[in-house]
Structure formats: C-alpha cells, structure tokens
Image (spheres, rainbow, N blue to C red):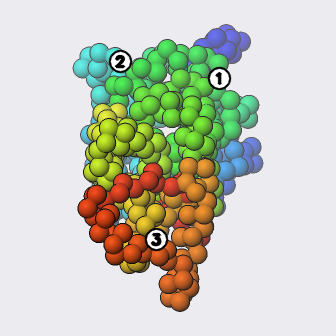
C-alpha cells in the first residue's frame, strides 16, 4: 500500500526489481528484431552476459511502429564486448559504447550505467560532462530519460523488464521523465528537444509535469555543443513528422535560437509557406523510405535568411552574384554559432543556392551548362519548392521541367532568343544586368531533392 502511494506521489520512481511482462502479455515478438541485433544479443548471451533490446525500439514495437534501429544494453563493458565480434569499434568519450557491424547493419551496444556522483561530472548549469560510471540494470533504467525509453526486451525469453512504469505510460500514451524534470533537463538540455520529437512521432501526450519547466529552461539549449545540437535537429527534421514537430517546438518556446530568426521567417507569409512546403515534402519522402539530403533540408530552412540578406545588399547597389555569395557566408557564419553544420553540407547548400539565379538564363548554351551541373537535380527541386510556395514563377518551373526531358529539337525551340549584337554591345557597355531574385519551386517532380 505504502509503495503504491509513493509511486503515485513520485512519478518515474525506479523499482529495485523490475515488473516483468511475459510473452503473451505484450505485443513484441522475437521475430520483429533485426537480424543484426538478434545475432549480437545471442553472442553476448553465449559469452555469459545479459543482453536486452532497449530504448526506442521497444517503445516503437509496443506502439505498433517499425523501429529504424535496434540498440542493445548489456552488463558487459565495452572492452569485454569488442573481442566477441570481428567488426566492433569502441566510440565516444562522454558516453563510451560499441558499434558492432553485422553485414550492413550497425548495432549499438551500451553497458548498464549508474548515476554520476563526481563533483566535476557536471558544468555550472548542471549539464553532465561524463556518463561512464557502470552499474546495475536498475541503475541504468533510472538514469535514462523517459519511462517509455527505459524498457528492456530479452530476445531469448521474449520478456519485457520494466523498472519505471514505462509499459503503463505507453498504454496511457503518455511521455514522462524519470526523476525531477528540472534536474533532468539541466543534466542534458537536449532532453527538451527529444521530448518534443518523441511525443510528436509516437503521437503521445507530454505529461504536464514533464512539459511545465521547458519554457523556463529553454535557454539551456545555448549550452549544448553546436555539433550535438546539429545531430538532434537533424533527427527532429528527418523524423517524418517535421511539420508537427516544428509547430510543437514553437508552442513550447524552443524554436527561437536553434535556427537564427526562424520565428521571424515563419511569420512572413512567403517564408512560412516555403518552409511548410519543404517540410511536408520531406515528411512524405521519409515516410515512404526515400532518401533525404540533410544539405537540401537545411538549405530550405535557411534560404529566406539568405534571400533577405541578398535583397538588402542589392538595395545598397552591390553586384548581384557577389552579394549572393556574401549573403550565404553571413548566414552560415551566424548559424555556426548555434548549430555546427558540417562543411561538406555547407558546400552542397551553397551550390543549391548559387544555382537559383541561373534558372532565369534560358538563352544560348547556358541552360545546357546548367543541366550538366552535378547539383542540377537538387537545385531544380529547390526551385520547384520555391514555385509551389509562390516565391518563383510557375511558368519558370514548368519551362525547366519540360526542357530537361525534351529532345534536342524541342530544346532548341524552347530557348529564348538572344539579344542582337548591337544590344549585347550596349549591355556590355553598361555592365551586366543584375539577376532578378531567384524563383522558387513546386513539389519536386520525379527523382528527389533528397537523393542529391
């Protein structure tokens, strides 16, 4: 009686022994586990260690969803796991774990952890700087973030071990932090973003006590390393529910500062329409298991900042193309202070942006040269999104859609006439005419922005 009362008064309280749900008491079966995860778990069991499928995979299976990957938790240390497999690599410093390669699948294996107790294990804001103290399975469950992520499925027995009431929360479709919310968010501010992402993807409600501190603690996101923040934003935007997630981020006061001026952009009619079109297209691709390019996605999110800076520079009478490149550099430099976008992605984003003015050039050999550009497909899909949102002329999008698939005779007929020689000389005497603002495109036809 007293224990049940304490459990109600202290949500997320961890039991020292688990509630075990046997096969038949839940809907998860051994056959639903990936071949790689099953192989890793079986080998760990054979070596005398415990091995459980853990985290999001168990949560998704209980909710009737298909997990993207399967992680394993074990009582073996990384040094004990690695020798058991031919291709296994210990990674990480803040959180050491093993990546085991089974065919094309990578299975992440982590050791049961206990709570950190060292004085120097957190920064001045309470953020954990190290998380490598190994412990028992019960301690491991207690230090995980949400109850529905702290469930352990044993492939050998098909049992689910639950130390924190996660199964009950899944059945109630509720997302609840383990432990005091303020403390847990201070330990890792990314948990606020994860709460939004998981609740949106799994279509569960965030428990009021879990949601309450988010608005006041949103500023802690500023303390997260930019590279880690980029990884989490990428997961948010490629979850297949980016549109709803972005709305929820704004509702909970978390969008401002993640992508500079994102709130301002979304308040502009064209900016909001463009981003909604882009994210809707991305969600559709993710849900149909098509590839999606992070470079393309971030290019869409930051485009209106580039466009605004570029337009302002042209209003100061700066030359169009140099002004565009300067605008790109300014936006990416400002963005790097918050989210560390990898250099290779930045290069692809710049190519997509810089090709937009070239779509207006439909005379002579210019269209043919643009067709041969390695980033043509991604740039055209970007133009198509701009067109659908109303930023670029639909006629321009339609022209390029026809031109790229037409035969040579039809292409020649589609080209716009060159200015006569005297007109070209006068034009050169005045200097090159500035390009108009790049158009925007409709939903990508066939192929895909993401595969570029």
Which quadrant of the figure has residue 198? top right
Residue 412 in the image, given as x and y percentages of width and height:
50, 84
Q: Does label 1 or label 3 sit earlier along the sequence?
A: 1
Viewer-nearest of labels 1 and 3? 3
Q: CA distance from mark 1 to mark 3?
A: 56 Å
Tell me, for residue 207, which label it has, or none. Answer: 1
Q: Does label 3 or label 2 sit earlier along the sequence?
A: 2
Q: Residue at x 61, y 50 (%)?
A: 390
Q: CA distance from mark 1 to mark 2?
A: 23 Å
Residue that badge 3 annotates? 362
Mark 1 Cα-neighbour bin, 10 Å: few <14, some 14–19, many ≥20: some
Q: Residue at x 74, y 31 (%)?
A: 172
Tell me, for residue 126, which label it has, or none. Answer: 2
As helix, strand or loop, the secondary structure at mark 3 comes to loop
Left or right of residue 57: residue 341: left
Tell me, for residue 243, which label it has, or none. Answer: none
As helix, strand or loop, the secondary structure at mark 2 comes to loop
Q: Residue at x 36, y 69 (%)?
A: 423
Residue 25 in the image, given as x and y percentages of width and height:
74, 43
Left or right of residue 277: residue 118: left
Q: Residue at x 65, y 18 (%)?
A: 208
Q: CA distance from mark 3 to mark 2?
A: 58 Å
Along the line of sight, the residue nearer the viewer: 177 or 427: 427
Along the line of sight, the residue nearer the viewer: 155 or 105: 105
């Amino acid at each position: 009686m007293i224990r049940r009362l304490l459990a109600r008064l202290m949500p997320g309280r961890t039991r020292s022994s688990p509630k075990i749900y046997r096969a038949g008491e839940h809907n998860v079966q051994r056959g639903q586990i990936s071949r790689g995860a099953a192989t890793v778990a079986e080998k760990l069991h054979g070596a005398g260690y415990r091995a459980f499928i853990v985290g999001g995979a168990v949560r998704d299976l209980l909710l009737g969803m298909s997990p993207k990957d399967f992680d394993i938790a074990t009582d073996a240390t990384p040094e004990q796991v690695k020798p058991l497999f031919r291709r296994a690599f210990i990674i990480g410093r803040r959180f050491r774990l093993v990546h085991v390669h089974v065919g094309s699948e990578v299975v992440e294996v982590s050791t049961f952890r206990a709570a950190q107790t060292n004085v120097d294990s957190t920064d001045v804001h309470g953020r954990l700087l190290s998380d490598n103290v190994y412990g028992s399975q019960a301690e491991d469950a207690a230090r995980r973030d949400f109850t529905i992520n702290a469930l352990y499925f044993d492939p050998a027995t098909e049992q689910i071990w639950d130390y924190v009431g996660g199964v009950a929360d899944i059945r109630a479709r509720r997302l609840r932090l383990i432990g005091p919310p303020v403390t847990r968010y201070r330990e890792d501010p990314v948990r606020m973003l994860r709460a939004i992402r998981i609740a949106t993807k799994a279509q569960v409600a965030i428990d009021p006590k879990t949601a309450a501190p988010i608005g006041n603690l949103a500023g802690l996101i500023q303390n997260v390393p930019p590279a880690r923040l980029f990884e989490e934003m990428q997961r948010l935007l490629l979850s297949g529910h980016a549109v709803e997630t972005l709305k929820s981020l704004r509702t909970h006061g978390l969008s401002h500062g993640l992508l500079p001026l994102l709130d301002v952009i979304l308040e502009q009619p064209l900016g909001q329409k463009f981003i909604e079109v882009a994210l809707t297209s991305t969600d559709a691709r993710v849900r149909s298991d098509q590839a999606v390019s992070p470079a393309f996605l971030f290019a869409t999110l930051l485009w209106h900042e580039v466009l605004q800076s570029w337009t302002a520079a042209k209003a100061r009478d700066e030359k169009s193309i140099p002004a565009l490149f300067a605008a790109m550099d300014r936006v990416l430099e400002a963005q790097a202070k918050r989210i560390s976008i990898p250099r290779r992605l930045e290069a692809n984003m710049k190519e997509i942006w810089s090709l937009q003015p070239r779509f207006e050039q439909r005379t002579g050999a210019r269209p043919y040269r643009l067709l041969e550009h390695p980033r043509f497909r991604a740039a055209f899909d970007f133009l198509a999104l701009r067109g659908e949102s109303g930023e670029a002329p639909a006629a321009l999008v339609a022209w390029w859609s026809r031109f790229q698939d037409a035969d040579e005779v039809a292409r020649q007929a589609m080209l716009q006439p060159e200015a006569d020689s005297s007109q070209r000389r006068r034009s050169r005497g005045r200097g090159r005419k500035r390009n108009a603002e790049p158009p925007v495109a409709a939903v990508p036809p066939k192929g895909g922005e993401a595969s570029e």
